[in-house]
Structures are given as structure tokens and as C-alpha cells.
Amino acid sequence: MADLKDIKADEVLDCKGLSCPMPLLKTKKAIQKLKSGQILEVLGTDPGTKTDLPAWCEKAGHEFLGVIEEAGYNRYFIKKG
Amino acid sequence: MSFKQTVANAYERLFVQTWTPLMGAIMIAFLCVLLEAWYRPWGIVGGLRNWADWFFYGIGLYEDAPPHPLYFSSSVLNIGFIWGAFIAACLAKQFAIRVPPFLEFIKAVVSGILMGIGSALAMGCNIGGFFVAIQNLAASGFLMMIGLIIGVRLGLIYLFWEIEHLPAGGGFEIGFQKICPYLGVLALIGLIVATYAYFGSDIDNGEILGGCLIITAGIGFAMHRSRLCIVNGFREPFMSGMAEMGKAVAIGIILGAIGVSILKYQEIRPEMMYVTPTFGIGALLGGFIFGLGMVVAGGCGSGSLWRVAEGQLKLWVVAIVFGLSNSFVRHLFSEYDVIENGYLGKAVYLPDYLGYGGTLFFIIFIMLLWYLIIDWNEETNKFVMEI
């Protein structure tokens, strides 16, 4: 996989401090605005997001590229399918 | 592979990686049956109400002093539950103070009030009124389930509206990653000491309470590890189509119902235990109001409490307001004898009508039907609501 750190996201969604289900719901909404192949970066702090997002991507046909753990939050990368 | 590596891998699997919902549901059903065999069924809202009763008593609104929180089983159940979930969150390095955007605090207050009213009407939250109620073969649990589903759908309509019209960001987290595992070990030692203290104490029901504490700590631990969330089980089929959590909840109810049937059939526990007089408007309307509240809250009775233990400030507000609101509504009920007059409904014990075998067939049938519908929906998205 290409290095996540080099990825430039087309859209960044701030879900820091939010708990279930808001991060997933906002992701679902935000990705509608992107074109196929574009990349959405989601910033989040809820531990549940770590399992929710990849599972949802698989179901919805998007590609979950991975996660970078920063101090105090995580960055999730999704490529729209 | 060295033995040390094997131990490290086992730690990672048990305490860091999220368990599957099904694993969580099986563990929780097992512990629910153990708790009922030990002393009583599991519940959440009774303990929250006890704490809130103390608040209202303290400010002079209530005349009679409530039972002592450390000597009252409902309260001890919650202490154990939060304690176990806290241990789990710490060992996984997932405990952190999470501060949401301001809008979430307003939602927390409103949803807490709704959950308090709903759980007063249904005489239990989604645990005592639904999950454990059906396990205890009470017909009201199914009525609450219908109410919950309708309430969840309405709550989702609100959430969809909210993300269109009220964009909110700017939350943050204050983490303790480095000290988390040490906190977890300290909390575990504390739990063991507290359990021994109960067993060795002079109070009448010390041993009973010690067992309640350690068993519910197990439930809290399993629930946090699997992030088992009954809201998720009801909500996701409509939101994302995902069904894994809902299917796990259905299996947990079936397993628990089999266990409790044995306890009740053998007269180890009274038949009418947790069969509340709410088969009627109470469970249905209560489920609807509670369902609406829990979607906006992002946590049901149990889900809110394990998120409290994980440091989610929004759910701290939810839990506090939920307890206060429930206490106040139940206080009004007792002023007007609402429960005694049967306004909420009748107490209906399913085996009185279907026999024990028939009741189990009925519960398994409904749960498997639900399982199949959401499983089918996961493939077809038939019930998924579009944003």
C-alpha cells in the first residue's frame, strides 16, 4: 500500500470528540459529495470508529486505505468506490 | 515463537482488540443468567434512579431517604458495570476524556430527559425493559421492542436533519495512553479488594452484593470489549444496513431466555421476577420515547454507562440527566399510584399462556425472524433510510 502519510485527501471531515453514530453518519454524508476515486480523510477520537469504518466501507463498496494514529486523534482514509 | 510472545499475543487478543459482537453477546447472556442465579436479574436504570433519588432528597424535594448506594443491589450493579468497563477501557488504552462539540451536550440533556421518561413508563431501560425482560419471559419486552424500533426510526430522521442543518465540529480528546494500563491494573486490584470487602463485611447482604459487584463487572468488561450496543443493533439496519450487532443481540436474548427459563421452571427464582405491569401503553410508549432518546444520545442504558467508563463526556451528561429524569417521573407515578392502578398495563408472564416450551419457541421464532430480516436487509438495503 502506498504510504498513507503521502496521501492528499480531497476532503477532510472533523469528527473529533463525537461518539457513535455521528462519525459514521457524517462520513456517509460527506462521501456523497465526492467523485469515485477521490479520498476522504476522517478525523476521529471514538474507539468504535476503528472497527465501524472499515466494516462500513466494505459493505458500501468504498476502499478503506488505513489509519494514522496522531497524538489525541486518529486519521482515517477512505477512497470512494 | 517464544512463550513471552504467546502471552503478548493473548493479551492483545483479549484486552486490546475488539471482540466480535457475537462473542460479547454470548458472554453477556451467560453472565446475565449467572447474576440471576446468584441473586437477581441485571438492570441499569434502578441504580441510576437510586443515585438521583439522593440528589432530590438532598435538595429537600423528596421526604424519605433512599437506600444507601453501597448497600442497595441496583446501585451496586451499576458500580460493578462501570468498574468493569473502566478496566476494559484502560487495559485497551482506550480511556480518554473525550469532549464533544457543544451541540452534543444539548442533545445529551434532551435525550437524557427522554430516556428517563421512557424508562419510567416501561419500568426499565432497554436492559430491564427489553433485553433482560424478554430473557425473563415477560411479554412487555416485545411491546417495548416495537416501541424502540419506531422511536429509533424517528430519532434517525432527526439526526439526518441535524447533519444537514447544524454542522458542528471542534471536539477534542485528553488522553492518558501511557498510564492507561497501570490505571487498569489498579482498578482491577481495587475491584478484587472491594469484592472481598463485601464478602467479609457485617452487613446483612454483604455476600450477595459482593457477587453482584463482581458479576456485573464481568458484564461491563465484556460489553466494552465487544462494544456491544443495543442502539447500534436497532439503528444500523436503518442507517448503514449493517446487521452484525443486531444479530448478536438476538442471539444473546435467546441464550439468556433459555437460562432464565431453567431458573424459573425449577422455581429457583420467582416466576414473576422482572415481569412488570407494563404490557400495554407503558412498554409501547416507553419504548418509543426511550428509542428516540437513545439514538440521539448515542447510547442506551448500558451503552451509555460503558461509554461513561471510557471517558465520553457527552454520555456522562446523558447518564446523569437520564437518572434525574427517571427518578422524577417515577416519583410522580408514586404520588398518583400510576403503577398500582395498572395505568401502564398488565403484568403478562408468557408461560402462563404458552407454557415454557411454547414461550421458548415464541422467543426463538421472533428473534430469528428479526435476525433474518436484518441479515436480508444487509444485502438488499431494503430498510436503509437515505440521507
Image (tube, helix red, strand yellow):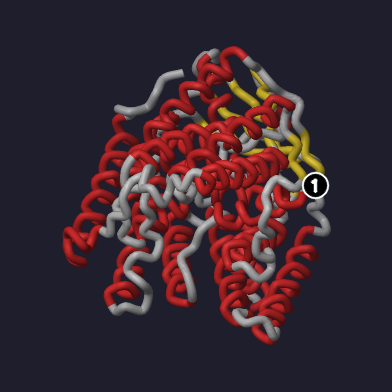
Q: Residue at x 55, y 52 (%)?
A: B45
Residue tagged by mark 1?
A: B175
- SS for tag 1? strand
Q: Residue at x 73, y 28 (%)?
A: B101
Picture quadrant where residue B242 is located: top left
Picture quadrant where residue A42 is located: top right
* Residue B181 shows in the view: yes
Task: Kindly identify the amino acid type of the residue bearing the numbered disc 1.
Answer: Gly
Q: Is residue B137 left or right of residue B71?
A: left
Check disc 1: other Cα within 10 Å, few if <14, some if 14-19, many if 20+.
some
| Image quadrant occupied by the N terminus of chain B | bottom right
Between residue B190 and residue A2, name the one nearer to us: B190
Number of callouts in the render? Answer: 1
Q: Residue at x 70, y 45 (%)?
A: B61
x, y (%) of residue A8? 69, 22
Between residue B117 and residue B44, name the one nearer to us: B117
x, y (%) of residue B16? 63, 58
Between residue B163 and residue B315, name the one nearer to us: B315
x, y (%) of residue B94? 70, 51
x, y (%) of residue B377? 31, 34
Q: Is residue B68 above or below residue B4?
A: above
Q: Is residue A16 left or right of residue B76?
A: right
Q: Is residue A49 above or below residue B53?
A: above
